Amino acid sequence: AAQMIPEISRVYIQLNADRFIKKGKRPEDLIYQPQFHFADMKWEFSDWMFLEYLSNPQRAAELFAQKWLLEKLPEISKKKICIGCIREEMEEMLKKTGTGPEVSLPRSA
């Protein structure tokens, strides 16, 4: 569990939130979507995996995805938590300045 929690300071969160606000970003613009890259995989496409793919491609893909996710889960967790903290800080900053969504006018269709 400790590997999945980022070591970030309040100052880091505030500086990044302020930087994103100054760039015109909204809290909902901050999204982390991890990308799968075969080059990141540290294991080979073995004969067994090849035979598994030939007989059951769905299962082979699930095995690759599962292995990748297990290896990347700490990194994914840290980035998602960090971005979530920055997003929440942005919302608080926008509330304080009166430019947050709670004071915006309804959008017309």
Image: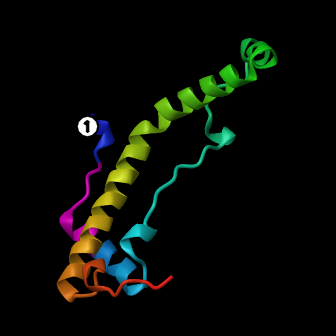
Please name the amino acid that badge 1 sits on. Answer: Ala
Q: Magenta segment range?
A: 6-14
Q: Is residue 9 magenta?
A: yes
What residue is rendered at 59% in x and 31% in y? 65
What residue is rendered at 29% in x and 74% in y? 90
Q: Is residue 15 visible?
A: yes
Quadrant in the rendering for residue 12:
bottom left
Q: x%, y% of residue 98?
A: 22, 88
Count of numbered tags = 1
Q: Please state which of residues 97 and 14 is positioned toward the viewer in this rendering.
A: 97
* The N terminus sits in image quarter: top left
Q: x%, y% of residue 64?
A: 63, 28
Q: Which residue is mark 1?
A: 2
Q: Residue furthest right?
A: 54
Q: Is residue 27 left or right of residue 48?
A: left
Q: x%, y% of residue 24?
A: 43, 84
